[in-house]
Image (cartoon, grey):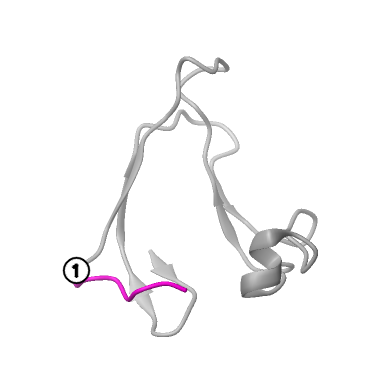
Amino acid sequence: MTLAGQPALTAAVSSDSRAGQVGVISGASTWLSEGTPVGAKYGSSRDEPYLNLRPKADSETAPSTTTYSFPTPTPTSG
């Protein structure tokens, strides 16, 4: 997986998220606007693809776990 940003980042991803509606979403119909805390800091995510995952089951007691592994240390944030 290649992640957007500067500098460019590449990561291996593993997840126990269950199937169904899992994949990359376009960001055209759901996004974070500049009016949100994240959008205020990083800009709107409109039309930016994002990874959509599901829990192991439709229950708050069954979260899924997703791990991103980077080949080199990630840059500092903020």
Q: Name the quarter where the N terminus is drawn.
A: bottom left
> Does the segment drawn in magenta span residue 2?
no
The span picked out in magenta is 72-78
**Residue tagged by mark 1?**
71
Name the residue at 72% across, 69% down. Answer: 47
Q: Residues within 10 Å of mark 1 (few under 14, many from 20)?
A: few
Q: Position of residue 51 (x, y in %)?
A: 53, 52
Q: Quadrant of residue 2?
A: bottom left
Name the residue at 43% across, 32% down. Answer: 17
Residue 48 horizontal side relative to residue 33, left or right: left
Magenta region's main secondary structure? loop
Q: Is residue 6 above or below residue 46?
A: below
Residue type at tag 1:
Pro
Q: Is residue 13 above or below residue 28?
A: above
Name the residue at 47% across, 14% down. Answer: 61
Q: Is residue 67 visible?
A: yes
Q: Is residue 45 visible?
A: no
> Does the segment drawn in magenta span residue 76?
yes
Name the residue at 19% across, 68% down. Answer: 71
Q: Position of residue 60 (x, y in %)?
A: 54, 18
